[in-house]
């Protein structure tokens, strides 16, 4: 029996280990969603969106199955045309982007797509009345205008270098969404788009069902029915995959290992910018102390977390930028140094008590750390962080809950959180760190406030010079060493197990927000049945 092959972006040590020595163990055929061979697919994902409206943030990073953006990404994450017929024409000063639109495109209700829909989408997102938490990502836009019905021109306030990356954002139909309340209308759950699939049903907390769009401008997909089963619990997702109820699923390393010997399934390992971190709220009496934050930042054994929690499927995280990225700042690595962590706490007046837990001015060095229920990777990271913190004399009490339970507590309680975007450092760092967004939903969850970081983020955002931007992000990363607002733990490779019914599946370098638009099904509209 030959070894199975890991396909996709740079594979993890784990992936190679899982695949070696495959034995004959067949997966059940079919599933309970009415699968008809390779004509349908049911995939298990961990989370579902809050909305399906791009006006409220759905699909902003691309790969929406219902909608298209002006541009999209290929397998190598390079931009290519979608609703635009070509990449944009950019003025010499970097302030004007002109997109010529693809002809003959229709929305799934038969209405023609045109420039008015692009203008409507961007203007609506930027409207103060629209509840889109990501609208600051479009801060550079001064205005957007139609040139007839076949072109759109964006005018920018400043030469925002990654602007083209922002135009993977899905386009909504003005004739439908424009006639409704943008925040609560039917369009938020019953969308109409130009994409390869049409939504046929959404059972909240259970599944999203799609069928192929026969009039899709890119050609009708071979996978005629596509279902995304929402299974928040990792163990349950693995069980449903093994029973044949799912054709594919994302799984944590220890559960993916259980499928290593299956000859009818393949493991796909995708590298990512996806990190796990611990928020250190500035409004907490313990984590609000910079000395505590600095001590925790070097008291965690990141290498051990990668080795033991991820089975080698990732790398230590020393900030939001992975060490392999050209945007990473050399010299900002945090080596594990428990002795130094203890000295920092000693010098700051946090003295150990009889039980080994430190205290200062009557405040015990203890705080809660929340993680989302059913997420084994977050649970494992939370427990490992708590164990390492205790060795330094800090008590971390782990708690599990839903986001509905966690969100009201984020101002004072720590959270095992995540983030990361491969497209551009602005996409993740601005929302994560700028003080103007402190406490704004899930933006800047730690309510971090550092004027040097604020200025550097603004400088990087408003410059078109790569050297200026690199220097600014270097400043941000060095400031996070001196004044951490978060303890970054690991960057995680995403693992997917997929039945072998289709050929030539690939993965992309993935962001933190994965599930619907990531995984081997990032381009399910291009899948072809495997030849028998």
Image (tube, rainbow, N blue to C red):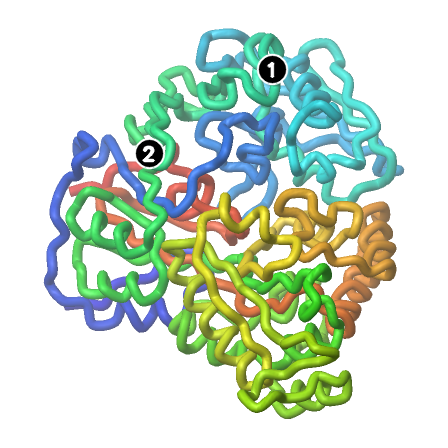
Q: Secondary structure beneath disc 1?
A: loop
Quadrant where the image shows the N terminus: bottom left
Query: Residue visible at 79% across and 68% down?
Result: 479
Camera-side residue: 281 or 203? 281
- Using the rendered view, name the quadrant where residue 203 is placed: top left
Which percent across, then down, holds residue 501?
22, 43
In this rendering, is residue 407 above or below 190?
A: below
Query: Residue visible at 29% across and 26% down?
Result: 224
In this rendering, is residue 88 above or below 178?
A: below
Which percent across, then down, holds residue 81?
59, 31
Judge from the rendering whether residue 114 lies leftward or rightward of residue 212; answer left or right: right
**Residue with the most extreme front position:** 362
Which percent across, then down, holds residue 254?
31, 67
Q: Which residue is mark 1?
A: 181
| CA–CA distance in space, label 1 to label 2 | 25 Å
Q: Secondary structure beneath disc 2?
A: strand
Q: Nearer the viewer, mark 1 or mark 2?
A: 1
Classify 10 Å Cα crowding around label 2: few (below 14), some (14-19), many (20 and above): some
- Using the rendered view, name the quadrant where residue 355 is placed: bottom right
Quadrant where the image shows the C terminus: top left
Q: Are marks 1 and 2 in contact (CB under 8 Å)?
A: no
Q: Which residue is mark 2?
A: 207
Q: Can residue 418 be spotted in the picture?
A: yes
Camera-side residue: 275 or 222? 275
In this rendering, is residue 144 above or below 305?
A: above
């Amino acid at each position: 029996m030959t070894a199975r092959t890991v396909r996709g972006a740079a594979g993890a040590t784990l992936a190679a280990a899982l695949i070696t020595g495959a034995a004959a163990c067949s997966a059940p055929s079919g599933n309970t969603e009415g699968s008809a061979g390779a004509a349908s697919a049911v995939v298990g994902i961990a989370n579902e969106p809050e909305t399906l409206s791009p006006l409220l943030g759905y699909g902003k990073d691309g790969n929406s199955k219902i909608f298209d953006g002006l541009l999209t990404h290929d397998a190598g994450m390079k931009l290519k045309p979608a609703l635009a017929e070509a990449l944009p024409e950019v003025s010499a000063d970097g302030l004007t982007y002109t997109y010529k639109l693809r002809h003959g495109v229709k929305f799934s209700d038969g209405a023609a797509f045109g420039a008015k829909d692009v203008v409507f989408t961007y203007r609506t997102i930027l409207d103060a009345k629209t509840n889109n938490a990501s609208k600051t990502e479009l801060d550079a836009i001064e205005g957007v205008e139609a040139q007839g019905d076949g072109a759109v021109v964006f005018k920018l306030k400043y030469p925002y270098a990654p602007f083209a990356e922002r135009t993977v954002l899905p386009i909504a139909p003005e004739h439908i969404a424009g006639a409704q309340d943008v925040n609560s209308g039917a369009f938020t759950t019953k969308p109409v788009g130009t994409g390869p699939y049409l939504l046929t049903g959404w059972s909240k907390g259970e599944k999203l069902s799609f069928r192929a769009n026969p009039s899709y401008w890119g050609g009708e997909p071979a996978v005629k029915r596509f279902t995304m089963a929402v299974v928040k619990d990792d163990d349950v997702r693995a069980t449903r995959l093994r029973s044949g109820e799912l054709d594919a699923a994302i799984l944590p390393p220890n559960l993916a290992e259980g499928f290593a010997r299956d000859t009818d399934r393949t493991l796909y390992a995708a590298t990512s910018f996806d990190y796990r971190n611990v928020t250190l709220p500035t409004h907490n009496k313990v984590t609000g102390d910079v000395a505590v934050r600095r001590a925790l930042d070097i008291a965690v054994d990141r290498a051990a977390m990668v080795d033991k929690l991820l089975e080698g499927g990732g790398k230590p995280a020393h900030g939001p930028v992975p060490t392999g990225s050209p945007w990473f700042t050399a010299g900002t690595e945090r080596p594990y140094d428990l002795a130094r962590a203890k000295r920092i706490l000693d010098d700051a007046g946090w003295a150990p008590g009889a039980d080994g837990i430190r205290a200062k001015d009557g405040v015990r060095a203890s705080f809660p750390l929340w993680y989302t229920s059913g997420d084994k990777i977050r649970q494992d990271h939370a427990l490992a962080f708590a164990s390492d913190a205790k060795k330094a004399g800090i008590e971390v009490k782990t708690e599990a809950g839903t986001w509905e339970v966690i969100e009201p507590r984020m101002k004072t309680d720590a959270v095992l959180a995540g983030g990361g975007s491969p497209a551009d450092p602005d996409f993740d760092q601005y929302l994560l760190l700028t003080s103007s967004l402190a406490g704004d939903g899930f933006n800047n969850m730690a309510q971090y406030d550092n004027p040097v970081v604020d200025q550097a983020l603004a400088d990087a955002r408003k410059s078109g010079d790569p050297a200026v931007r690199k220097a600014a992000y270097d400043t941000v990363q060095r400031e996070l060493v001196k004044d951490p607002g978060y303890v970054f733990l690991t960057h995680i490779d995403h693992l997917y197990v997929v039945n072998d019914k289709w050929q030539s599946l690939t993965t992309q370098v993935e962001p933190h927000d994965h599930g619907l638009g990531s995984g081997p099904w990032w381009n399910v509209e291009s899948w072809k049945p495997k030849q028998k």
